[in-house]
Image (cartoon, rainbow, N blue to C red):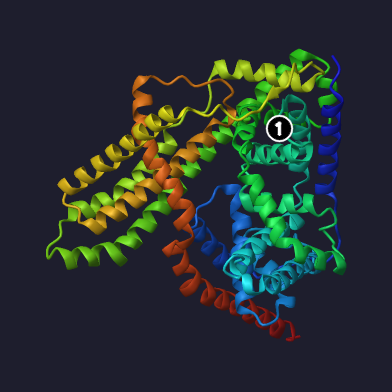
Amino acid sequence: MELSPSTQQLITKYRNWVVSKEAKTVENTIEVDEVASKVAAFYEKIRGVVDWREEHLLRKTAIERMLKRRLLMTRKPEEVAEPLLSELVRGGHFPNGRIPTSAIPAVQEIITKYLFLIEHAKKEAGGETKIKDPRSLESWLLGIAASEIEETLSPPLKELALREFAALRMQSRITADLPESEFNFLILIAVERALFQIDDTTLNQHLLFKFIPDWDHPSHQTLLAVSERIWNIRKQIEDLFHHPLAEYVYRYVEKHDTPYLLLGDIVEQHREEVLDLTLDPAATEGLVREAYEARLQKLKKKLRRAGIYSTLSIFVSKVVLAVAIEVPLDRYLVQHPSLLPLALSVSIPPLLMFFLVMGTRPSSEENFQRLLLETMALFYEKEPGPPHEIRLPKRRGGFVRAMVSLAYLSSFLVSFGALIWILNRLGFTVPSMLIFLFFVSLVAFAGTVIRQRAKELQVTELKEGFFFGLFDLFFLPIVRAGKWLSRSLMRYNAVSMFFNVFLEIPLQIFIEFIEQWRAFLKEKKEEIH
Protein backbone atom coordinates (compact mmCIF):
# COMPACT_ATOMS: atom_id res chain seq x y z
CA MET A 1 0.00 0.00 0.00
CA GLU A 2 1.21 3.48 -0.86
CA LEU A 3 1.49 6.35 1.57
CA SER A 4 -0.62 9.40 0.83
CA PRO A 5 1.32 12.34 -0.67
CA SER A 6 0.45 14.58 2.28
CA THR A 7 1.84 11.97 4.71
CA GLN A 8 5.06 11.72 2.68
CA GLN A 9 5.34 15.52 2.80
CA LEU A 10 4.86 15.46 6.57
CA ILE A 11 7.69 12.91 6.91
CA THR A 12 9.98 15.15 4.86
CA LYS A 13 9.20 18.17 7.07
CA TYR A 14 9.90 16.14 10.22
CA ARG A 15 13.26 15.10 8.82
CA ASN A 16 14.09 18.74 8.08
CA TRP A 17 13.13 19.58 11.68
CA VAL A 18 15.56 16.96 13.01
CA VAL A 19 18.35 18.29 10.79
CA SER A 20 17.74 21.84 12.09
CA LYS A 21 17.84 20.58 15.69
CA GLU A 22 21.08 18.71 15.21
CA ALA A 23 22.82 21.56 13.37
CA LYS A 24 26.03 22.45 15.21
CA THR A 25 26.97 26.07 15.81
CA VAL A 26 30.34 27.47 16.79
CA GLU A 27 29.17 30.98 17.64
CA ASN A 28 29.18 32.51 21.10
CA THR A 29 26.32 31.65 23.41
CA ILE A 30 24.63 33.24 26.43
CA GLU A 31 26.09 31.77 29.61
CA VAL A 32 25.13 32.53 33.20
CA ASP A 33 26.70 31.83 36.59
CA GLU A 34 25.76 28.39 37.94
CA VAL A 35 25.20 29.59 41.51
CA ALA A 36 22.91 32.43 40.43
CA SER A 37 21.17 30.02 38.06
CA LYS A 38 20.31 27.59 40.88
CA VAL A 39 18.78 30.38 42.97
CA ALA A 40 16.76 31.70 40.01
CA ALA A 41 15.66 28.21 38.91
CA PHE A 42 14.43 27.45 42.44
CA TYR A 43 12.38 30.65 42.42
CA GLU A 44 10.92 29.79 39.00
CA LYS A 45 9.78 26.40 40.35
CA ILE A 46 7.97 28.19 43.15
CA ARG A 47 6.37 30.53 40.62
CA GLY A 48 5.34 27.48 38.62
CA VAL A 49 3.31 26.35 41.64
CA VAL A 50 1.85 29.78 42.43
CA ASP A 51 1.03 30.67 38.79
CA TRP A 52 0.16 27.13 37.81
CA ARG A 53 -0.22 26.64 34.08
CA GLU A 54 -0.10 23.59 31.89
CA GLU A 55 3.48 22.49 31.29
CA HIS A 56 3.69 23.65 27.67
CA LEU A 57 2.62 27.19 28.69
CA LEU A 58 5.07 27.70 31.56
CA ARG A 59 7.93 29.10 29.51
CA LYS A 60 5.80 31.49 27.48
CA THR A 61 4.09 32.70 30.66
CA ALA A 62 7.51 33.32 32.26
CA ILE A 63 8.72 35.28 29.20
CA GLU A 64 5.62 37.48 29.31
CA ARG A 65 5.98 38.10 33.05
CA MET A 66 9.71 38.95 32.80
CA LEU A 67 9.24 41.12 29.71
CA LYS A 68 6.49 43.22 31.28
CA ARG A 69 8.49 43.65 34.48
CA ARG A 70 11.67 44.69 32.69
CA LEU A 71 9.87 47.16 30.44
CA LEU A 72 8.18 48.64 33.50
CA MET A 73 11.47 49.07 35.39
CA THR A 74 13.85 50.16 32.63
CA ARG A 75 14.50 53.55 31.09
CA LYS A 76 16.17 51.94 28.07
CA PRO A 77 13.68 49.58 26.40
CA GLU A 78 16.10 49.30 23.47
CA GLU A 79 18.44 47.31 25.76
CA VAL A 80 15.95 44.85 27.27
CA ALA A 81 16.71 41.76 25.15
CA GLU A 82 20.08 40.76 26.62
CA PRO A 83 19.12 40.88 30.33
CA LEU A 84 15.78 39.21 29.47
CA LEU A 85 17.53 36.27 27.76
CA SER A 86 20.03 35.97 30.60
CA GLU A 87 17.16 35.84 33.09
CA LEU A 88 15.40 33.15 31.06
CA VAL A 89 18.54 31.03 31.02
CA ARG A 90 19.14 31.59 34.75
CA GLY A 91 15.58 30.53 35.48
CA GLY A 92 16.09 27.23 33.67
CA HIS A 93 13.68 28.00 30.82
CA PHE A 94 16.49 27.49 28.29
CA PRO A 95 19.71 25.46 28.69
CA ASN A 96 22.82 27.33 29.80
CA GLY A 97 25.21 27.96 26.92
CA ARG A 98 22.73 26.99 24.19
CA ILE A 99 21.16 30.29 23.09
CA PRO A 100 23.47 32.05 20.61
CA THR A 101 24.31 35.68 21.22
CA SER A 102 22.96 36.37 17.72
CA ALA A 103 19.49 35.87 19.24
CA ILE A 104 19.88 39.10 21.22
CA PRO A 105 19.34 41.50 18.28
CA ALA A 106 16.58 39.26 16.92
CA VAL A 107 14.70 39.37 20.23
CA GLN A 108 15.32 43.11 20.57
CA GLU A 109 13.85 43.62 17.10
CA ILE A 110 10.68 41.81 18.23
CA ILE A 111 10.41 43.93 21.40
CA THR A 112 11.02 47.18 19.48
CA LYS A 113 8.39 46.20 16.90
CA TYR A 114 5.65 45.78 19.49
CA LEU A 115 6.69 48.84 21.50
CA PHE A 116 6.34 50.84 18.28
CA LEU A 117 2.79 49.55 17.87
CA ILE A 118 1.93 50.32 21.50
CA GLU A 119 3.24 53.89 21.26
CA HIS A 120 1.48 54.68 17.98
CA ALA A 121 -1.74 52.91 18.99
CA LYS A 122 -2.00 55.23 21.99
CA LYS A 123 -1.85 58.18 19.61
CA GLU A 124 -4.47 56.55 17.39
CA ALA A 125 -6.76 56.10 20.43
CA GLY A 126 -6.62 59.85 21.09
CA GLY A 127 -9.81 61.00 22.73
CA GLU A 128 -11.47 57.59 22.30
CA THR A 129 -9.75 56.08 25.35
CA LYS A 130 -13.13 55.18 26.83
CA ILE A 131 -13.79 53.01 23.79
CA LYS A 132 -10.22 52.05 22.97
CA ASP A 133 -8.34 50.95 26.07
CA PRO A 134 -4.59 51.47 25.47
CA ARG A 135 -3.62 49.45 28.56
CA SER A 136 -5.61 46.46 27.38
CA LEU A 137 -4.03 46.69 23.94
CA GLU A 138 -0.56 47.03 25.49
CA SER A 139 -1.05 43.84 27.53
CA TRP A 140 -2.41 42.08 24.44
CA LEU A 141 0.56 43.08 22.29
CA LEU A 142 3.18 42.24 24.93
CA GLY A 143 1.62 38.80 25.31
CA ILE A 144 1.97 38.30 21.55
CA ALA A 145 5.58 39.58 21.77
CA ALA A 146 6.34 36.96 24.45
CA SER A 147 4.90 34.23 22.24
CA GLU A 148 6.96 35.38 19.25
CA ILE A 149 10.12 35.54 21.38
CA GLU A 150 9.59 31.95 22.52
CA GLU A 151 9.07 30.71 18.96
CA THR A 152 12.13 32.65 17.78
CA LEU A 153 14.31 31.02 20.43
CA SER A 154 12.73 27.58 20.00
CA PRO A 155 11.08 27.35 16.55
CA PRO A 156 8.10 24.92 16.62
CA LEU A 157 8.87 23.43 13.20
CA LYS A 158 7.50 20.01 14.10
CA GLU A 159 4.22 21.43 15.44
CA LEU A 160 3.89 23.71 12.41
CA ALA A 161 4.25 20.75 10.03
CA LEU A 162 1.60 18.73 11.86
CA ARG A 163 -0.68 21.77 12.12
CA GLU A 164 -0.57 22.37 8.37
CA PHE A 165 -1.10 18.66 7.67
CA ALA A 166 -4.15 18.45 9.98
CA ALA A 167 -5.64 21.77 8.82
CA LEU A 168 -5.37 20.69 5.16
CA ARG A 169 -7.09 17.38 5.91
CA MET A 170 -9.83 19.05 7.93
CA GLN A 171 -10.53 21.51 5.10
CA SER A 172 -11.49 18.55 2.93
CA ARG A 173 -13.51 16.81 5.66
CA ILE A 174 -15.75 19.60 6.90
CA THR A 175 -17.66 22.39 5.23
CA ALA A 176 -19.77 25.37 6.25
CA ASP A 177 -21.72 28.16 4.62
CA LEU A 178 -18.94 30.71 5.12
CA PRO A 179 -16.33 32.49 2.98
CA GLU A 180 -13.39 30.11 2.45
CA SER A 181 -10.77 32.33 4.12
CA GLU A 182 -12.94 32.89 7.20
CA PHE A 183 -13.70 29.17 7.52
CA ASN A 184 -10.02 28.26 7.13
CA PHE A 185 -9.19 30.62 10.02
CA LEU A 186 -11.74 28.81 12.19
CA ILE A 187 -10.19 25.46 11.24
CA LEU A 188 -6.70 26.75 12.05
CA ILE A 189 -7.84 27.94 15.49
CA ALA A 190 -9.61 24.63 16.18
CA VAL A 191 -6.61 22.53 15.05
CA GLU A 192 -4.14 24.43 17.23
CA ARG A 193 -6.40 24.28 20.25
CA ALA A 194 -7.22 20.59 19.81
CA LEU A 195 -3.77 19.24 18.93
CA PHE A 196 -1.51 21.44 21.06
CA GLN A 197 -3.81 23.07 23.66
CA ILE A 198 -2.58 26.43 22.41
CA ASP A 199 -3.71 29.38 24.52
CA ASP A 200 -5.34 32.52 23.14
CA THR A 201 -2.13 34.57 23.37
CA THR A 202 -0.20 32.22 21.08
CA LEU A 203 -3.19 32.00 18.74
CA ASN A 204 -3.23 35.81 18.61
CA GLN A 205 0.38 35.72 17.46
CA HIS A 206 -0.22 33.08 14.79
CA LEU A 207 -3.29 34.91 13.45
CA LEU A 208 -1.43 38.22 13.44
CA PHE A 209 1.19 36.63 11.18
CA LYS A 210 -1.61 35.39 8.91
CA PHE A 211 -3.13 38.85 8.76
CA ILE A 212 0.27 40.50 8.09
CA PRO A 213 2.40 38.16 5.91
CA ASP A 214 5.72 40.06 6.34
CA TRP A 215 5.32 40.59 10.08
CA ASP A 216 8.51 38.69 10.94
CA HIS A 217 10.69 41.52 9.58
CA PRO A 218 8.37 44.45 8.80
CA SER A 219 9.56 47.60 7.10
CA HIS A 220 8.96 51.00 8.68
CA GLN A 221 6.10 51.58 6.24
CA THR A 222 4.52 48.27 7.28
CA LEU A 223 4.84 49.20 10.96
CA LEU A 224 3.13 52.54 10.35
CA ALA A 225 0.34 50.90 8.36
CA VAL A 226 -0.21 48.20 11.00
CA SER A 227 -0.18 50.73 13.86
CA GLU A 228 -3.04 52.56 12.14
CA ARG A 229 -5.03 49.31 11.76
CA ILE A 230 -4.06 47.47 14.96
CA TRP A 231 -7.37 48.21 16.73
CA ASN A 232 -9.30 46.76 13.79
CA ILE A 233 -6.93 43.78 13.49
CA ARG A 234 -7.42 42.97 17.15
CA LYS A 235 -11.19 43.16 16.75
CA GLN A 236 -11.06 40.86 13.69
CA ILE A 237 -9.07 38.28 15.66
CA GLU A 238 -11.42 38.48 18.65
CA ASP A 239 -14.42 38.15 16.32
CA LEU A 240 -12.94 34.88 15.04
CA PHE A 241 -12.63 33.56 18.61
CA HIS A 242 -16.29 34.44 19.26
CA HIS A 243 -17.60 33.35 15.86
CA PRO A 244 -20.96 31.51 16.16
CA LEU A 245 -19.50 28.43 14.42
CA ALA A 246 -16.09 28.45 16.18
CA GLU A 247 -17.18 26.14 19.01
CA TYR A 248 -18.82 23.64 16.61
CA VAL A 249 -15.73 23.50 14.38
CA TYR A 250 -13.57 22.93 17.46
CA ARG A 251 -15.81 20.11 18.70
CA TYR A 252 -15.51 18.26 15.40
CA VAL A 253 -11.74 18.74 15.18
CA GLU A 254 -11.21 17.81 18.83
CA LYS A 255 -13.21 14.59 18.33
CA HIS A 256 -10.96 13.56 15.39
CA ASP A 257 -7.55 14.96 16.41
CA THR A 258 -6.02 11.89 18.13
CA PRO A 259 -4.99 10.05 14.92
CA TYR A 260 -2.98 13.13 13.91
CA LEU A 261 -1.16 13.11 17.25
CA LEU A 262 -0.29 9.43 16.85
CA LEU A 263 0.81 9.95 13.25
CA GLY A 264 3.10 12.79 14.38
CA ASP A 265 4.58 10.58 17.13
CA ILE A 266 5.24 7.74 14.68
CA VAL A 267 6.90 9.98 12.10
CA GLU A 268 9.04 11.60 14.82
CA GLN A 269 10.20 8.29 16.33
CA HIS A 270 10.67 6.37 13.05
CA ARG A 271 11.40 9.11 10.54
CA GLU A 272 14.20 7.15 8.82
CA GLU A 273 12.46 3.81 8.35
CA VAL A 274 8.80 4.84 8.32
CA LEU A 275 8.58 4.98 4.53
CA ASP A 276 9.58 1.29 4.31
CA LEU A 277 7.70 0.10 7.40
CA THR A 278 4.42 1.60 6.37
CA LEU A 279 4.41 -0.34 3.11
CA ASP A 280 3.31 -3.24 5.33
CA PRO A 281 -0.07 -2.59 7.04
CA ALA A 282 0.76 -5.09 9.81
CA ALA A 283 3.96 -3.17 10.61
CA THR A 284 1.96 0.07 10.57
CA GLU A 285 -0.47 -1.37 13.12
CA GLY A 286 2.49 -2.17 15.36
CA LEU A 287 3.73 1.40 15.09
CA VAL A 288 0.29 2.75 15.97
CA ARG A 289 0.09 0.48 19.03
CA GLU A 290 3.57 1.58 20.15
CA ALA A 291 2.76 5.28 19.72
CA TYR A 292 -0.57 4.82 21.50
CA GLU A 293 0.99 3.13 24.54
CA ALA A 294 3.73 5.77 24.77
CA ARG A 295 1.25 8.65 24.57
CA LEU A 296 -1.06 6.94 27.09
CA GLN A 297 1.78 6.70 29.63
CA LYS A 298 2.76 10.31 28.93
CA LEU A 299 -0.84 11.41 29.41
CA LYS A 300 -1.10 9.61 32.75
CA LYS A 301 2.12 11.26 33.89
CA LYS A 302 0.84 14.67 32.76
CA LEU A 303 -2.38 14.14 34.68
CA ARG A 304 -0.48 13.21 37.84
CA ARG A 305 1.66 16.34 37.49
CA ALA A 306 -1.40 18.49 36.84
CA GLY A 307 -3.09 17.00 39.88
CA ILE A 308 -0.13 17.67 42.15
CA TYR A 309 0.76 21.16 40.91
CA SER A 310 -2.81 22.43 40.63
CA THR A 311 -3.57 21.09 44.12
CA LEU A 312 -0.48 22.80 45.54
CA SER A 313 -1.33 26.04 43.77
CA ILE A 314 -4.88 26.05 45.15
CA PHE A 315 -3.63 25.12 48.63
CA VAL A 316 -0.99 27.89 48.75
CA SER A 317 -3.43 30.51 47.45
CA LYS A 318 -6.10 29.40 49.93
CA VAL A 319 -3.73 29.46 52.92
CA VAL A 320 -2.46 32.95 52.04
CA LEU A 321 -6.01 34.24 51.58
CA ALA A 322 -7.11 32.61 54.83
CA VAL A 323 -4.26 34.21 56.80
CA ALA A 324 -4.61 37.62 55.13
CA ILE A 325 -8.41 38.00 54.99
CA GLU A 326 -10.46 35.10 56.34
CA VAL A 327 -9.01 34.79 59.84
CA PRO A 328 -9.00 38.56 60.58
CA LEU A 329 -12.61 38.91 59.37
CA ASP A 330 -13.76 35.90 61.35
CA ARG A 331 -12.10 37.26 64.49
CA TYR A 332 -13.82 40.59 63.93
CA LEU A 333 -17.27 39.07 63.32
CA VAL A 334 -17.01 36.21 65.83
CA GLN A 335 -14.95 36.66 68.98
CA HIS A 336 -13.99 32.97 69.21
CA PRO A 337 -14.28 31.47 65.71
CA SER A 338 -14.29 27.67 65.33
CA LEU A 339 -11.27 26.04 63.75
CA LEU A 340 -13.44 23.52 61.85
CA PRO A 341 -14.68 25.96 59.17
CA LEU A 342 -11.12 27.24 58.62
CA ALA A 343 -9.76 23.69 58.32
CA LEU A 344 -12.51 22.71 55.85
CA SER A 345 -12.07 25.95 53.90
CA VAL A 346 -8.34 25.30 53.45
CA SER A 347 -8.55 21.55 52.78
CA ILE A 348 -11.67 20.97 50.65
CA PRO A 349 -10.78 23.03 47.50
CA PRO A 350 -7.35 21.36 46.95
CA LEU A 351 -8.82 17.92 47.74
CA LEU A 352 -11.62 18.53 45.23
CA MET A 353 -9.05 19.49 42.59
CA PHE A 354 -6.96 16.40 43.35
CA PHE A 355 -9.88 13.99 43.02
CA LEU A 356 -11.25 15.67 39.91
CA VAL A 357 -7.92 15.33 38.13
CA MET A 358 -6.81 11.95 39.43
CA GLY A 359 -10.18 10.26 38.96
CA THR A 360 -9.98 10.28 35.15
CA ARG A 361 -9.89 7.36 32.72
CA PRO A 362 -7.78 8.30 29.67
CA SER A 363 -8.69 5.44 27.29
CA SER A 364 -9.83 1.84 26.74
CA GLU A 365 -9.11 -1.09 24.37
CA GLU A 366 -12.37 -0.51 22.48
CA ASN A 367 -11.32 3.09 21.96
CA PHE A 368 -7.90 1.97 20.66
CA GLN A 369 -9.44 -0.26 17.98
CA ARG A 370 -11.44 2.68 16.63
CA LEU A 371 -8.35 4.85 16.88
CA LEU A 372 -6.32 2.29 14.93
CA LEU A 373 -8.72 2.41 11.97
CA GLU A 374 -8.70 6.21 11.83
CA THR A 375 -4.89 6.42 12.07
CA MET A 376 -4.44 3.82 9.31
CA ALA A 377 -6.74 5.91 7.11
CA LEU A 378 -4.37 8.87 7.55
CA PHE A 379 -1.34 6.86 6.43
CA TYR A 380 -2.86 5.59 3.21
CA GLU A 381 -4.94 7.16 0.47
CA LYS A 382 -8.55 6.47 1.41
CA GLU A 383 -11.68 8.26 0.32
CA PRO A 384 -12.82 10.39 3.25
CA GLY A 385 -16.46 10.33 2.17
CA PRO A 386 -18.72 13.36 1.89
CA PRO A 387 -17.60 16.31 4.06
CA HIS A 388 -19.35 16.91 7.36
CA GLU A 389 -21.35 20.13 7.29
CA ILE A 390 -20.94 22.46 10.27
CA ARG A 391 -24.08 24.44 10.98
CA LEU A 392 -25.69 26.18 13.89
CA PRO A 393 -28.27 24.09 15.75
CA LYS A 394 -31.88 25.02 15.17
CA ARG A 395 -33.13 27.65 17.55
CA ARG A 396 -35.51 26.34 20.15
CA GLY A 397 -38.97 27.78 20.37
CA GLY A 398 -39.66 30.51 22.91
CA PHE A 399 -41.52 28.17 25.29
CA VAL A 400 -38.79 25.50 25.14
CA ARG A 401 -36.05 28.10 25.71
CA ALA A 402 -37.91 29.45 28.70
CA MET A 403 -38.32 25.98 30.20
CA VAL A 404 -34.65 25.11 29.67
CA SER A 405 -33.56 28.42 31.20
CA LEU A 406 -35.87 27.85 34.15
CA ALA A 407 -34.47 24.33 34.68
CA TYR A 408 -30.89 25.65 34.56
CA LEU A 409 -31.71 28.50 36.96
CA SER A 410 -33.34 25.98 39.31
CA SER A 411 -30.27 23.74 39.26
CA PHE A 412 -28.07 26.80 39.89
CA LEU A 413 -30.15 27.85 42.90
CA VAL A 414 -30.30 24.29 44.26
CA SER A 415 -26.53 23.75 43.87
CA PHE A 416 -25.41 26.96 45.53
CA GLY A 417 -28.33 26.97 47.97
CA ALA A 418 -27.39 23.50 49.22
CA LEU A 419 -23.74 24.51 49.60
CA ILE A 420 -24.65 27.68 51.52
CA TRP A 421 -26.98 25.71 53.81
CA ILE A 422 -24.26 23.15 54.58
CA LEU A 423 -21.63 25.83 55.19
CA ASN A 424 -23.99 27.72 57.48
CA ARG A 425 -24.63 24.56 59.49
CA LEU A 426 -20.86 24.05 59.81
CA GLY A 427 -20.41 27.52 61.30
CA PHE A 428 -18.98 29.45 58.33
CA THR A 429 -19.30 33.23 58.50
CA VAL A 430 -20.60 35.11 55.44
CA PRO A 431 -17.11 36.24 54.23
CA SER A 432 -15.79 32.68 54.69
CA MET A 433 -18.74 31.33 52.70
CA LEU A 434 -18.09 33.72 49.83
CA ILE A 435 -14.37 32.90 49.73
CA PHE A 436 -15.11 29.15 49.93
CA LEU A 437 -17.67 29.30 47.09
CA PHE A 438 -15.21 31.38 45.06
CA PHE A 439 -12.47 28.76 45.39
CA VAL A 440 -14.78 25.77 44.89
CA SER A 441 -16.14 27.30 41.66
CA LEU A 442 -12.64 27.98 40.33
CA VAL A 443 -11.49 24.49 41.28
CA ALA A 444 -14.56 22.90 39.65
CA PHE A 445 -13.87 24.74 36.40
CA ALA A 446 -10.10 24.13 36.35
CA GLY A 447 -10.52 20.47 37.29
CA THR A 448 -13.16 19.97 34.59
CA VAL A 449 -10.87 21.54 31.97
CA ILE A 450 -8.05 19.17 32.97
CA ARG A 451 -10.49 16.22 32.85
CA GLN A 452 -11.44 17.24 29.32
CA ARG A 453 -7.76 17.29 28.37
CA ALA A 454 -7.53 13.74 29.71
CA LYS A 455 -9.77 12.70 26.81
CA GLU A 456 -6.90 13.43 24.41
CA LEU A 457 -6.91 9.79 23.23
CA GLN A 458 -10.68 9.34 23.28
CA VAL A 459 -12.49 8.97 19.95
CA THR A 460 -15.49 6.90 21.08
CA GLU A 461 -18.38 8.36 23.01
CA LEU A 462 -18.20 7.80 26.76
CA LYS A 463 -21.46 6.36 28.12
CA GLU A 464 -22.52 7.89 31.39
CA GLY A 465 -25.36 6.53 33.48
CA PHE A 466 -28.33 8.22 35.07
CA PHE A 467 -26.52 9.16 38.28
CA PHE A 468 -23.65 10.82 36.40
CA GLY A 469 -26.18 12.82 34.38
CA LEU A 470 -27.94 13.89 37.58
CA PHE A 471 -24.59 14.85 39.12
CA ASP A 472 -23.71 16.96 36.06
CA LEU A 473 -27.05 18.73 36.27
CA PHE A 474 -26.17 20.20 39.66
CA PHE A 475 -22.38 20.38 39.24
CA LEU A 476 -22.49 22.26 35.92
CA PRO A 477 -23.69 25.58 37.44
CA ILE A 478 -20.68 25.55 39.78
CA VAL A 479 -18.38 24.88 36.80
CA ARG A 480 -19.98 27.69 34.80
CA ALA A 481 -19.57 30.10 37.71
CA GLY A 482 -15.91 29.07 37.96
CA LYS A 483 -15.43 29.73 34.24
CA TRP A 484 -16.79 33.25 34.61
CA LEU A 485 -14.69 33.92 37.70
CA SER A 486 -11.50 32.58 36.13
CA ARG A 487 -11.87 34.85 33.12
CA SER A 488 -12.95 37.90 35.09
CA LEU A 489 -11.03 37.77 38.35
CA MET A 490 -7.98 35.50 38.06
CA ARG A 491 -5.96 38.37 36.62
CA TYR A 492 -6.03 39.73 40.17
CA ASN A 493 -4.35 36.68 41.70
CA ALA A 494 -3.30 38.13 45.06
CA VAL A 495 -0.48 35.65 45.62
CA SER A 496 0.96 36.26 42.15
CA MET A 497 0.76 40.04 42.63
CA PHE A 498 2.53 39.70 45.99
CA PHE A 499 5.36 37.73 44.34
CA ASN A 500 5.63 40.28 41.51
CA VAL A 501 5.77 43.36 43.73
CA PHE A 502 7.53 42.27 46.90
CA LEU A 503 9.70 39.30 45.92
CA GLU A 504 10.53 39.16 42.25
CA ILE A 505 12.08 42.58 41.70
CA PRO A 506 14.42 42.54 44.75
CA LEU A 507 15.25 38.87 44.12
CA GLN A 508 16.28 39.57 40.51
CA ILE A 509 18.46 42.48 41.67
CA PHE A 510 20.09 40.15 44.24
CA ILE A 511 20.61 37.36 41.67
CA GLU A 512 22.22 39.73 39.17
CA PHE A 513 24.43 41.07 41.96
CA ILE A 514 25.57 37.49 42.76
CA GLU A 515 26.40 36.93 39.10
CA GLN A 516 28.35 40.19 38.81
CA TRP A 517 30.18 39.58 42.09
CA ARG A 518 31.23 36.07 41.10
CA ALA A 519 32.38 37.35 37.71
CA PHE A 520 34.44 40.01 39.50
CA LEU A 521 36.03 37.42 41.79
CA LYS A 522 36.83 35.18 38.84
CA GLU A 523 38.47 38.08 37.02
CA LYS A 524 40.61 38.94 40.08
CA LYS A 525 41.69 35.31 40.52
CA GLU A 526 42.79 35.17 36.89
CA GLU A 527 44.97 38.22 37.48
CA ILE A 528 47.02 36.23 40.00
CA HIS A 529 49.93 34.63 38.11
- Do we see residue 515 in this rendering? yes
User: Taking 93 as reference, is 384 left or right?
Assistant: right
Residue 177 place in picture, x, y as percent: 71, 31
Q: Residue furthest left?
A: 336
Q: Residue furthest front?
A: 398
Q: Residue at x 39, y 35 (%)?
A: 405
Q: Residue at x 69, y 51 (%)?
A: 236
How many numbered marks does the figure carry? 1
User: Taking 120 as reference, is 321 left or right?
Assistant: left
Residue 408 place in picture, x, y as percent: 37, 35
Residue 311 place in picture, x, y as percent: 41, 48
- Do we see residue 102 in this rendering? no
7 over 313 or under it: above or below = above
Q: Report the amino acid beneath label 1.
A: Asp
**Front-most of 418 and 318?**
418
150 over 510 or under it: above or below = above
Q: Residue at x 73, y 18 (%)?
A: 376
**Front-most of 504 and 429?**
429
User: Taking 202 as reference, is 215 left or right?
Assistant: right
User: Where on the picture, by quarter, is residue 447?
Assistant: top left
**Front-most of 484 and 389?**
389
**Front-most of 264 and 478?**
478
Q: Which residue is mark 1?
A: 265
Report the quarter where the C terminus lies.
Answer: bottom right
User: Where on the picture, by quarter, is residue 104?
Assistant: bottom right
Report the quarter where the N terminus lies.
Answer: top right
Few, some or many residues within 10 Å of mark 1 (<14, 14–19, 20+)? some
Callout 1 secondary element: helix
123 over 17 or under it: above or below = below
